[in-house]
Amino acid sequence: MLSINKLGSDKAYEFVFDAKYKIDTSTEYQKSYGGIGPKEEIITVLSICLCGFISLIASLLKMIYLEMNFN
């Protein structure tokens, strides 16, 4: 969850993010990566989603900044 507040204001912007993926608990995976984690085919998808997520957060922060400065 991401919460953004303007100093001196009671107004808060709250964002909830949820990600679901299958965990690989195999011995081979743990040997390769040092622990359990997302299945290998998901890693590429997650990296693409992360780039989109960062872009979304940047847009939201810009929108909030502009609104806070004009209110």
Image (spheres, rainbow, N blue to C red):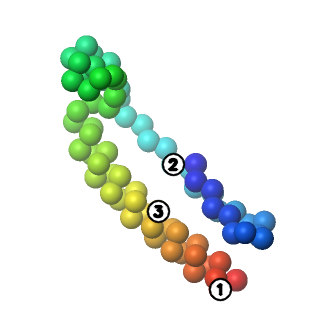
Q: Quadrant of the C terminus?
A: bottom right
Q: Is residue 46 placed above or below 34 in the rendered structure?
A: below
The residue lying at 63 percent from left, 61 percent from top is 4
Q: Is residue 47 placed above or below 34 in the rendered structure?
A: below
Secondary element type, mark 2: loop
Q: Residue 48 at x, y = what percent?
A: 28, 52
Would you call the spot at circle 2 few (<14 residues within 10 Å), some (14-19), or many (20 or more)? few
**In the shown orientation, is residue 57 left or right of residue 25?**
right
Would you call the spot at circle 3 few (<14 residues within 10 Å), some (14-19), or many (20 or more)? few
- Mark closest to the chain's N terminus, 1 or 3: 3
Q: Residue 22 at x, y = what percent?
A: 35, 29
The residue lying at 37 percent from left, 34 percent from top is 21
Alpha carbon separation for disc pair 2 and 1: 27 Å
- Tell me the number on the disc at residue 70: 1
Alpha carbon separation for disc pair 3 and 2: 11 Å
**In the shown orientation, is residue 43 left or right of residue 59?**
left
Q: Are marks 1 and 3 in contact (CB under 8 Å)?
A: no
Query: Which amino acid, mark 2?
Result: Phe
The residue lying at 29 percent from left, 23 percent from top is 34
Residue on which the image places disc 3: 57
Query: Which amino acid, mark 1?
Result: Phe
Can you tell which of label 2 and label 1 is closer to the viewer? Answer: 1
Secondary element type, mark 1: helix
Q: Are marks 2 and 1 in contact (CB under 8 Å)?
A: no
Q: Residue furthest bottom?
A: 70
